Amino acid sequence: RILFEQDEHPDHVVVIKYVPYVADSKRAMDEYTSEIFMGGKNTIVMHNTCEDSLLATPLIYDLVILAELCERITMKKTDAESWETFHPVLSLLSYMLKAPLVPNGAPVVNALFAQRQAIINVMRACLGLAPENHMSLEHRLESSLEELRKQTENGRAAKKARLE
């Protein structure tokens, strides 16, 4: 399993189909279905036509700005001697991309709200404010990931010894 555990599912689904005839002009149909009184269903359908490259430009700017900002952030654990930066696989960028990429040993967070909240909380930490939730700094530093890997290996070895 790559993205999800056995009973995990995404909280949203996006389907994109390429149509050569329309070139850069893309058409989207979004359906939002909700339950209403007495088990009924209400569906709102929106049709949208736009230029793909014009939609992507602000996203590319945001990706570059966030990546540059994260490159400047350094942090130090209480008992550590040296400062460290984020892991080179910058999982905070997952909020703006379709498939989250995370360092080995870090959990895949494929929930849009949690990804957004992680960015907000990193920015709050830069201002000296407490996180609200979903920052997951323990999965964003190389030294922390190494500690988690060791703990996982030790836990597996202990479980295997108990079973034998």
Image: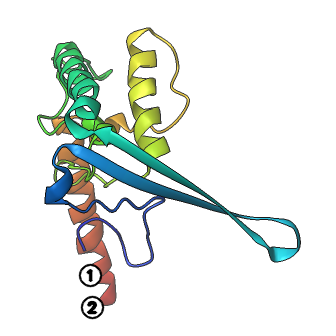
Coordinates of residue 110 in the picture (x, y in percent): 37, 54
* Direction from residue 157 to residue 122 in the image, left or right: right
Q: How is the image coloured?
A: rainbow
From the viewer's side, name the closer residue of 157 and 53.
Answer: 53
| Residue at 14% over, 40% down | 89
Q: Secondary structure at mark 2?
A: loop
Coordinates of residue 116 in the picture (x, y in percent): 43, 35
The span from disc 2 to disc 1 (Cα, nearest Å) is 5 Å
- 36 shown above or below 131: below
Type of the residue with mark 1: Ala
Coordinates of residue 27 in the picture (x, y in percent): 34, 51
Q: Are marks 2 and 1 in contact (CB under 8 Å)?
A: yes
Kindly indicate the quadrant of the structure image that contains residue 97.
top left
From the viewer's side, name the closer residue of 78 and 75.
Answer: 75
Q: Residue furthest front?
A: 21
Few, some or many residues within 10 Å of mark 1 (<14, 14–19, 20+): few
Query: Which disc, if any, is residue 164?
Result: 2
Q: Secondary structure at mark 1?
A: helix
Type of the residue with mark 2: Glu
User: What residue would you read off at disc 1?
Assistant: 161
- 72 shown above or below 49: above
| Residue at 25% over, 63% down | 17
Coordinates of residue 111 in the picture (x, y in percent): 44, 51
* Direction from residue 153 to residue 159 in the image, left or right: right
Q: Residue furthest right?
A: 38
- 5 shown above or below 29: below
